[in-house]
Image (spheres, grey):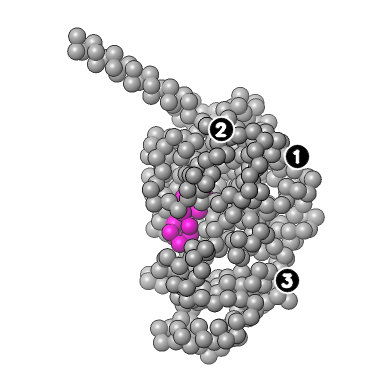
């Protein structure tokens, strides 16, 4: 009798487990790099208009500081500020080990030691959900348990429709092999925004191109009968603003004769002084403070969340919106490769804000909201999949769960 009862109990548990698996949603998280919050108001984005009518649309998506690509993609996928997940800029130096992280260095981006946060695909995989990434910063780390079940090495020139086709191939796999969470990335608005500026006809072309990719996603999901069971979330890592060579501050000229090491340039810069001249450098920068603000690391305003990490240099300089902090070398480089748009500024400035649009079975219909913080997307994903989040996140579910139906 006991054996029969155990067998009956096992059947019930297996059936319940099967129901849970069958009820798992599909979620595709799509990033349109550099897609500013107001690009959807130019009358050239019918597929975004569709989501606005049938799903959730936010006024904007607030990035973390610095409003740059890699820090914010990692913040979106981990729910942590850059000071906590470790990717504090697109490029920075670890002065303790004299090693350098750069988003252009394939060896660095695959090295798990730089990534202190737990990506959503790690959280999901550990709780039995297969995941995939057709490009996303951090998805290529070499540790087996820290990347998605399926992922591709980033290829910048990979045709956009082929990326969507690759996602569809994953969704056609047998059910037990099929990923339920997938990330997807497209760079066009960032690339054109940098080169031509956010108000250019070239950037308008990029906006329309990405909107058409969104439409292609809808079409292909319909073909495989998954459109009604898939949540599509469209985000961007940051916005874009106009810049010009006339709005430039040469910090190297100001600090002439002083010894230091420098990270980054443009919207913000980090300075690591020699031990003996921290106050000399700070005083020199403070005396000449014009079109920028200089802070000792511990004094960076709390709303930036950019001080709680030893890899942040001891001095942080943040440019006035639209201005650029440069060195002699970077000024010469701009003469050859000029840029008319940039990002990385104060993340509360609307020009730096991106987009958040979502549509699917888990999201409310025709629901428009204000600004969403990108660190809250991670706990939202955990809620959708009904899994436990990493307890160390900075994001908060209570600030975003109202956009869900349940």
User: Taken as a whole, is the magenta stretch helix, strand or loop?
Assistant: helix
Residue 119 screen position, x and y as percent:
45, 48
Q: Which residue is mark 1?
A: 46
Looking at the rendering, the stretch of residues picked out in magenta corresponds to 75-86
Q: Which residue is mark 2?
A: 405
- Disc number lying in front (1 or 2): 2
Badge 2 element: loop
Give the residue at the far bottom of this rendering.
257
Residue occupying the point 51% across, 51% down? 375
Name which of mark 1 and mark 2 comes first in the sequence.
1
- Disc number lying in front (2 or 3): 2
Residue closest to the eye, 163 or 391? 391
Image check: 10 left or right of 323?
A: left
Residue closest to the eye, 180 or 54? 54
Name which of mark 3 and mark 1 comes first in the sequence.
1
Task: Estimate how packed mark 1 is, as few (under 14), some (14 to 19) or many (20 or more) residues with alpha carbons within 10 Å.
Answer: some
Image check: 385 left or right of 164?
A: left
Residue occupying the point 61% across, 50% down? 371
Badge 3 element: loop
Task: Estimate how packed mark 2 is, as few (under 14), some (14 to 19) or many (20 or more) residues with alpha carbons within 10 Å.
Answer: few
Alpha carbon separation for disc pair 3 and 1: 32 Å
Residue occupying the point 80% across, 55% down? 201
Q: Which residue is mark 3?
A: 244
> Which label belongs to residue 179?
none
Give the residue at the far left of this rendering.
2
- Is-magenta flag for residue 152? no
Residue closest to the eye, 73 or 319? 319
Alpha carbon separation for disc pair 2 and 3: 45 Å
Residue occupying the point 52% across, 46% down? 399
Task: Estimate how packed mark 3 is, as few (under 14), some (14 to 19) or many (20 or more) residues with alpha carbons within 10 Å.
Answer: some
């Amino acid at each position: 009798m006991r054996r029969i009862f155990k067998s009956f109990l096992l059947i019930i548990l297996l059936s319940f487990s099967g129901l849970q698996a069958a009820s798992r949603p599909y979620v595709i998280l799509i990033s349109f790099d550099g897609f500013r919050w107001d690009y959807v108001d130019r009358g050239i984005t019918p597929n975004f208009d569709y989501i606005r009518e049938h799903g959730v649309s936010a006024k904007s998506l607030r990035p973390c500081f610095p409003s740059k690509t890699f820090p914010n993609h990692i913040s979106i996928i981990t729910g942590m500020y850059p000071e906590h997940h470790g990717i504090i800029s697109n490029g920075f130096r670890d002065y303790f080990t004299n090693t350098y992280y750069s988003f252009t260095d394939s060896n660095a981006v695959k090295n798990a030691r730089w990534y202190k946060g737990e990506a959503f695909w790690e959280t999901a995989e550990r709780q039995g959900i297969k995941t995939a990434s057709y490009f996303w910063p951090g998805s290529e780390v070499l540790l087996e348990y820290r990347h998605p079940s399926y992922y591709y090495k980033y290829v910048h020139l990979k045709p956009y429709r082929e990326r969507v086709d690759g996602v569809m191939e994953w969704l056609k796999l047998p059910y037990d092999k099929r990923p339920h969470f997938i990330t997807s990335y497209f760079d066009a608005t960032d690339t054109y925004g940098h080169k031509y500026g956010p108000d250019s006809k070239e950037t308008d072309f990029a906006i329309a191109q990405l909107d058409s990719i969104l439409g292609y996603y809808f079409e292909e999901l319909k073909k495989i009968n998954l459109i009604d069971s898939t949540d599509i979330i469209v985000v961007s890592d940051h916005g874009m603003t106009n810049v010009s060579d006339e709005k430039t501050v040469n910090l190297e000229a100001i600090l002439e004769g002083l010894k230091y090491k420098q990270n980054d340039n443009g919207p913000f810069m980090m300075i690591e002084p020699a031990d003996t001249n921290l106050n000399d450098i700070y005083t020199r920068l403070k005396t000449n403070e014009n079109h920028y603000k200089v802070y000792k690391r511990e004094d960076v305003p709390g709303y930036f969340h950019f001080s709680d990490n030893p890899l942040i240099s001891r001095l942080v300089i943040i440019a006035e919106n639209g201005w650029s902090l440069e060195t002699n070398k970077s000024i010469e480089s701009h003469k050859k490769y000029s840029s008319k748009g940039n990002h990385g500024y104060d993340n509360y400035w609307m020009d730096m804000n991106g987009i958040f649009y979502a549509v699917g079975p888990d999201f409310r219909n025709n629901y428009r909201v204000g600004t969403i913080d990108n660190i809250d997307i991670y706990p939202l994903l955990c809620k959708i999949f009904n899994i436990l989040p990493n307890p160390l996140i900075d994001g908060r579910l209570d600030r975003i769960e109202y956009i869900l139906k349940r």
